[in-house]
Amino acid sequence: MGQVPCAASAAAPDTASVSIRQLVEVVDFDGVSVSPDGRLVAFRTEQASVERNTYDTFWYVQPIDGSSLPRRLGEGGAPLRDSGGGSVPEVAAWSPDGRWIFYRTVLDGRVEVWRAAVDGSRTEPVVRDPANVRRFSVGADGTMLEYSVGATREAVVDAEQAEYDHGVHIDRTVPLGDDLFRSGYHEGRLATQRLVDNELERFPLLSQAPDHWKAVDVATGAGKDLPLDEVPAKPLATADLPSELGVVSQLSVDRGSGRVALLIRPDRPDDRAGRSAVELAMLPGPRAGHPVKCAAEPCVNKVVTDIGWRPGSDEIVFTVTAPDNGQSIFLWNVVNGAVRPVIQSRGQIGGGGRWEPGPCGVSPDALVCVAADADRPPRLERIDLSSGSRSVLFDPNAALAQDMAHSVSVSEIHWTDVRGESFTGEFYPAATQGHTPPALFIAYYRCSGFLRGGMGDEWPLAMLALNGISALCINAAPTQDDAIARYEQGQAAVESAVDHLASHGDIDPARVGMGGLSFGAEVAMWAAMHSRVPRAVSVSTPVISPSLRLLLGLWGDVYFSRLKRFWQLGSFEETPERWKRISPYYHVEQVKVPVLMQMSEQEYRLALDYAVPLIREHRADVYVFPNESHQKFQPRHKLAVYERNLDWFRFWLLGEEDRNPAKAGQYAQWRRMRQGMVSGQSK
């Protein structure tokens, strides 16, 4: 490996840490919903606070016509999180008269229901229960609120303490390798975790306690337990539909007619990039067995990602996501079959959320959507359903958008590999220094919305470009069922992208780095073993190894069938050659480039069988972040990860070091790694 000489105490631009912090503290949106009369929209904002290492959420309402600014109504508390670390979207419920919104809050470890008057006059609790609220609904006349709870908070704490005092019995529900006592965040507190439905999804203790339904009078606060015959019916779910329809991945019910919009997904065994074509259809009713399918060109063989009904009409609003992750919205008339376009966007446009944005809010005349582009952060937009015209309703990220526009350019690029397969990506060019083209960093997986740090949000793409390293986020092509074919496809995408950019003089092919999360980490580690392109790699999650098979082994056939299905791996005795090809545990000597691993406490142990030898041989530097899951979310951790990744690639690709004395130990370690790798190559 060619080495880059280290510049003497080169300093990053003064704006680096401030701009990185701006990327951490972007305001996101979710929960977009329209009032019963179609005049107002409610939504929630979410923003990180590095100082307090938490997130602030606030509920707003605003006229859909944009005639006035949004009115802030109340706090939502800390966002609830899914098992992978992502923020769980919350949607407010409207009172039938449109004067109130009801929403769950997470305050001091309590999940409650509050309501806020849309005129801003009052915000108050409606449900304060000894247990956390799971679901709720507002009665038809708005006077009663029905809600479900599980085990009380006191019972959960007692169960955790009992395990602590008497020992934790190891069975397949225990996530082996995790801390056994209060190791992850759930419902606003550190909680003891258990595996419930599979070997990956973690939930708090007693989470499987059955729903207990109650009702409260909204005006007086008087509450009662609900008998079984008064429990509200569950919303229609995909499992309630006739089985002959196939795999229904999403549905939306028209409140007026009871018709059901459907997305029917082919039973594909593996879709690592997370996107495959579906059929858009409509059922006249929940029990109907013969769907009406959309046959127009915008519906057929397309990746339809969201659906909803236009109020008071025969039209379904549906969103199509292109291979480059640009999104378009259409209207399908289920009576006459006509489909007409509403809007086409280069970026993401939906109801909020980072990776899966959800449907926009829909009124009879307009959509209200969260729009985000690779180079422009999220904002709330109104989209006219007749003309497709767009107008911004609320943009709390306007200052960052202006900074991005003035300092960073982003362009969509297209290229093909030697086999003729097409790829797309978002390219952040760095300024050329002298006669040498810039170095390049590549993130591989999915490039959707505002690209802070690629999939998983770990590599500050704009800041890399501002520091002399061009950045490219590559959208994974539709993936192969065979794992090695997937990795080779990713390797071909990376190598052909480097060739494409180098042929235009845009980058220096001798100075390329890679990073990735999940499937992106798998491709990055494969490239570290099998490609000559990357000169340095950074990953945030483990890849397949014997440790992973051991620690998830109590799930037996459930997990082993997953290994067989996704990676074509049996036991070590059954498929030894396959294991040796896929896992870096068997290829430590092939990893010729330095690897930075910034992993969550929940997952890092799954990588120790190959990480420890790499550390010992001065080819890996490993950091672990406490109480984090698959995707890290704590703001201070995000800031640290961004900064270290920037430092890492500046060091290995540019030979530069930050003068900050607090980083002296970091650079001493990396210099030892560089010397060790040079010595190893000279032997």
Image (cartoon, grey):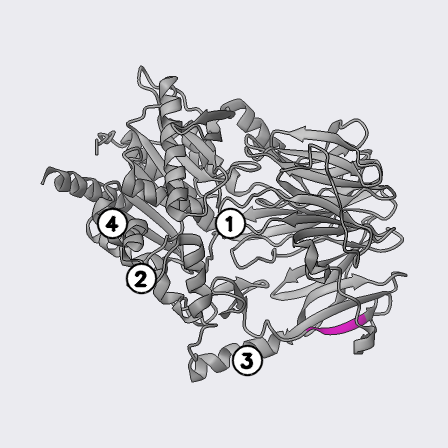
In this picture, is 266 found above or below 176? above
Quarter in which the N terminus is drawn: top left
Circle 2: residue type: Glu
Circle 1: residue type: Glu
Kindly report the distance in space between the C-alpha atoms of the residues bearing marks 4 and 3: 46 Å
Front label number (3 vs 1)? 3
Sequence-first tag of 2 and 4: 2
Is disc 1 surrounded by few (<14), some (14 to 19) or many (20+) residues within 10 Å? few
Name the residue that disc number 4 marks.
Answer: 587
Front label number (4 vs 3)? 4
Kindly report the distance in space between the C-alpha atoms of the residues bearing marks 1 and 2: 52 Å
Cβ–Cβ under 8 Å for marks 4 and 3: no
Q: Position of residue 84 (x, y in %)?
A: 51, 56
The answer to whether residue 661 is visible is no
Q: Main secondary structure of the magenta part?
A: strand
Sequence-first tag of 2 and 3: 3
Q: Position of residue 243 (x, y in %)?
A: 68, 60
Q: Which residues are magenta?
A: 211-215
Front label number (2 vs 3)? 2
Residue shown at 69%/33% (left/top)?
298
Name the residue that disc number 2 marks.
Answer: 574
Q: Is residue 130 left or right of residue 564?
A: right
Pick the front one: 78 or 94: 94
Name the residue that disc number 1 marks.
Answer: 51
Name the residue that disc number 3 marks.
Answer: 158
Q: Position of residue 204 (x, y in %)?
A: 54, 69
Circle 4: residue type: His
Kindly report the distance in space between the C-alpha atoms of the residues bearing marks 3 and 1: 32 Å
Q: Is residue 382 left or right of residue 156?
A: right
Kindly report the distance in space between the C-alpha atoms of the residues bearing marks 2 and 4: 19 Å
In this picture, is 389 found above or below 617? above
Total numbered labels placed on residues in the image: 4
